[in-house]
Image (cartoon, grey):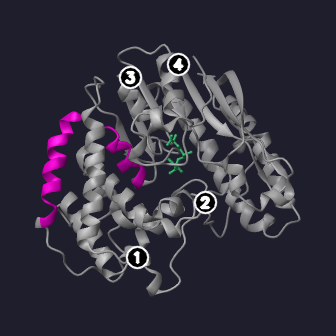
Amino acid sequence: MLVINPKRVNEEIEEKPYWYNYYAGYSHSFAKSIIETAGLNESSIILDPWNGAGTTTLMSSVIGHKSVGVDLNPVMKIIATAKQANRSDIGIIESKLLGLPAVRAKKERADDPLFLWFRDSGVTAIRRVERAIVKSSKFVSVSAKVESLEASECVLYTALFNCVRTYLKDFIPSNPTWIKKPKNDDDKVDVGWKEFKARYTSLVLDMLNGLRVEEHIWPADRALVNVASSTRLPLPNDHVDLVLTSPPYCTRIDYGVATLPELAVISIIGTSDIDDVRRSLMGTTTVPKKVDAPTAGEVGELCFKFLEDVKAHSSKASGTYYYKNLLQYFTGLSRSILEVSRVMRPNASFVCVVQDSFYKDLHCDLPSMIVELGGMAGLKLDQRHDFVSKQNMVNLNARSKSYRKETTAYECVLIFVK
Ligand SMILES: C[S@@+](CC[C@H](N)C(=O)[O-])C[C@H]1O[C@@H](n2cnc3c(N)ncnc32)[C@H](O)[C@@H]1O
């Protein structure tokens, strides 16, 4: 396998870079290089159990392979599925776009989470577009709604997410995983239908132009993108030939908060379904009241030792909140790696892009922890490549800087064989 630096550098020459800028991901060229040199054949299946914005599923389709993407955040399913759209979807997208003005606005529910940032006219405009994308309003859950979406509808949703974000610029700080709320109603975004529609339409047209110039021959089956947990993969044993992924970061990144505006757009019952998604993601900042301490046999010696060190750390809430938070993360990680191994065919490869990080002054050597967990799950480490990564998620946690002099982290590519 040809392993190049996974860091995203030349976004402009990448495939569909403008579709949704997800901060968490490796480059398309990295994924392409791995997939092309993995010795796959026509019947091979590629899996990404933490598919995010769908780099793996996109590049699998571009190269012509079947793939399965799994992510617990329904927003990610929409974005990854949008990237599976191709020229055959252009007509339907155009006709939905033309249908926009015909949809009449109605009074929005007072508990609509979009009211967090937008005034009445903005919320009405966003919902008016949304109603043109999905005609039915009878969905009982966000997952039912998201499951029903075709690739063309996901393109329209992705443009809506991007459009909403352009109005939220003042609320999105440099840390891409946080979003501020307006202090009072006067600070809320004031946008009317005409302006919103014009901006939205131009974003969709950009995407359509992108689709028009594509020349790939797509595989007969588009990638299957599922809303599911990596801890319970919806796949049979011995099923996939290559796993290419990067796990959620171990730096208390709240993936739910990172996509709060998008979750607000797809929500259907006020904010409670958003909270459910947030709580379920690995790395969530919400922790359960009570947790059962794991044994080293469950999470591996390295994770176990790290957790014990966090628990004993003198800083505030280390032994309570942070310990529970990290425990939740490592339990999820070890279960997920067992699942990955279960669904891999014998001799299949597992390529995992992972960074180390720090909790205060404690080094979290996630690559080595994953090597250990892989071994426990019956996977043999075949290669390890370390790349220095100056800008990384470690630096997002500003407070960690007061504990450590050096903020260089390593982005590590681990390749296991079953
Ligand atoms: C580092 S990102 C993956 C980036 C992705 N490889 C890309 O290129 O866009 C990790 C992803 O894991 C997802 N995630 C968190 N907990 C999960 C779980 N239990 N099961 C599946 N996905 C989960 C998050 O929603 C996030 O999108």
Mark toward the start of the polypeptide (3 vs 1): 3
Which type of secondary structure does the marked residue at label 3 adopt? helix
Choose between 327 and 85: the one closer to the eye: 85
Mark 4 crowdedness (10 Å alpha carbons): few <14, some 14-19, many ≥20: some
Q: Looking at the image, is 409 positioned above or below residue 221?
A: below
Gap between marks 2 and 3 measured at Cα:
34 Å
Contact, CB < 8 Å: mark 1 with mark 4? no
Q: Is residue 198 left or right of residue 288?
A: left
Task: Provide residue 76's location: percent of width, then percent of height.
Answer: 42, 50
Q: Is residue 354 left or right of residue 30?
A: right
Task: Provide residue 305's location: percent of width, then percent of height.
Answer: 82, 47
Q: Looking at the image, is 228 positioned above or below residue 130?
A: above
User: Residue 416 lies in what quarter of the image?
Assistant: top right
Q: Find residue 174 and name its label.
A: 2
Contact, CB < 8 Å: mark 2 with mark 3? no
Gap between marks 1 and 4 measured at Cα:
54 Å
Q: Is residue 157 left or right of residue 40?
A: left
State yes or no: residue 90 in magenta. yes
Q: Amino acid at mark 4?
A: Pro
Gap between marks 4 and 2 measured at Cα:
43 Å
Residue found at x 54% / y 37%: 339
Residue found at x 85% / y 53%: 404
State yes or no: residue 136 in magenta. no
Q: Amino acid at mark 1?
A: Val
Confirm or reject: label 2 Cβ below 8 Å from ligand 1.
Answer: no
Residue found at x 29% / y 30%: 214
Gap between marks 3 and 4 measured at Cα:
23 Å
Which type of secondary structure does the marked residue at label 1 adopt? loop
User: What kind of secondary structure does the magenta stretch mostly adopt?
Assistant: helix
**Residue highlighted by disc 1:** 189
**Residue highlighted by disc 3:** 63
Q: Find residue 346 and name its label.
A: 4
